[in-house]
Image (tube, helix red, strand yellow):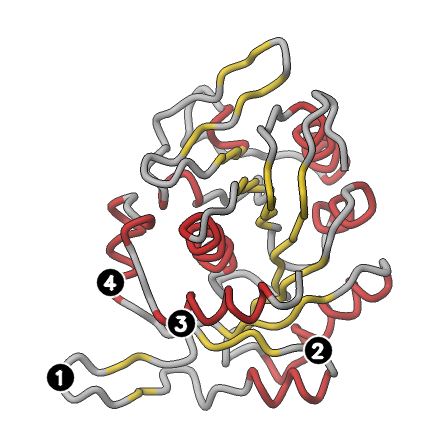
């Protein structure tokens, strides 16, 4: 897919979830970091206009994208040079709420997509807002996606919520790359036992039932949360996100 500035983007992947609070921004960011560690040129676009968290995780909340003749130049993450764009970075006051109706939100996303001057990226990850509303619809209709990663958590109500997201993707004829189950367990720091905070993990079972690939489980990890708060997510490593990218890599 060619951008307005003539820059090529290899693959575009959207990360979505049926409802909020399952950590899809965390999954988007972990994927971006792990892919960048493997030498890929990665972009990360935060399309969650009403609740953007990605700039905080990467410690770029105070950076402003430059507006050049080629378009809006993404901010680069400090360690790995991941190119990041978020509506929040374009606001005068980051704590301003964005109180817009659907059509305006959709227009903002389309403009962002058209105006950002990415460099030659191997992969662009789009972090979608939760649910099946205006923005996911706009993204799937107007952006050439390689595929969609669905994020769920064990407490997603009786599968219904995940199924809605998956059915939306199918209705819009986009491929599903697989399901990630986040917050699956917590490992006790003292004894190493896995504690199932939100009930038994069901990601694999659900994936089989729905006929989509299962990409893996991610635990609740206090160290990860700490890195997110400090804006040092690029310093966090985990065998779980590594194996997630191993599995995803076979599909893209």
Residue holding disc 1: 190
Residue in the image at 44% along x and 88% along y: 199
**Does 199 sit above or below residue 215?**
below
Q: Earlier in the sequence, mark 1 or mark 4?
A: 1
Residue 141 lies, in percent from the top left, at 83, 46
Dot 4 falls on a residue whose secondary structure is helix
Q: Is residue 233 left or right of residue 133?
A: left
Q: Which element type, helix, strand or loop, lies under badge 2?
A: loop
Q: Quadrant of the C terminus?
A: bottom right
Residue 240 numbered tag: 3
- Which of the two discs, 1 and 3, labels the residue nearer the N terminus? 1
What residue is shown with label 2? 212
Q: CA distance from mark 3 to mark 2?
A: 19 Å
Compared with 156, 10 (above or below) is above
In primary-sequence order, the first of circles 3 and 2 is 2
Q: Local crowd at mark 2 within 10 Å, few (<14), some, or many (≥20)?
A: some
Choose mark 4 or mark 3, whichever is in front: 3
What distance separates the C-alpha of mark 4 from that of mark 3?
13 Å
Q: Nearer the viewer, residue 218 or 146?
A: 146
Residue 227 in the image: state x and y as whole percent: 27, 53
Q: Residue at x 52, y 43 (%)?
A: 42
Residue 81 lies left or right of residue 78; in this view the side is right
């Amino acid at each position: 897919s060619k951008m307005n500035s003539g820059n090529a983007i290899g693959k575009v992947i959207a990360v979505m979830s049926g409802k909020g609070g399952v950590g899809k921004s965390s999954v988007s960011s972990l994927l971006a970091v792990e892919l960048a560690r493997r030498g890929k040129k990665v972009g990360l676009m935060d399309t969650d206009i009403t609740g953007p968290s990605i700039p905080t995780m990467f410690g770029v909340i105070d950076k402003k994208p430059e507006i050049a003749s080629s378009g809006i130049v993404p901010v680069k993450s400090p360690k790995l040079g991941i190119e990041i764009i978020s509506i929040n970075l374009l606001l005068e006051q980051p704590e301003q709420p964005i109180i817009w109706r659907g059509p305006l939100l959709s227009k903002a996303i389309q403009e962002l997509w058209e105006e950002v001057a990415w460099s030659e990226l191997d992969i662009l990850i789009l972090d979608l807002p939760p649910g099946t509303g205006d923005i996911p619809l706009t993204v799937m209709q107007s952006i050439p996606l390689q595929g969609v990663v669905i994020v769920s958590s064990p407490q997603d109500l009786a599968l219904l919520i995940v199924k809605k997201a998956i059915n939306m993707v199918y209705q819009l004829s986009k491929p599903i790359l697989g399901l990630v189950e986040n917050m699956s367990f917590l490992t006790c720091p003292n004894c190493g036992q896995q504690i199932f905070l939100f009930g038994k993990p069901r990601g694999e079972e659900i994936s089989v039932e729905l006929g989509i690939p299962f990409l893996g489980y991610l635990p609740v990890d206090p160290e990860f949360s700490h890195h997110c708060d400090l804006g040092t997510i690029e310093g966090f490593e985990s065998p779980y996100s590594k194996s997630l990218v191993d599995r995803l890599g076979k599909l893209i």
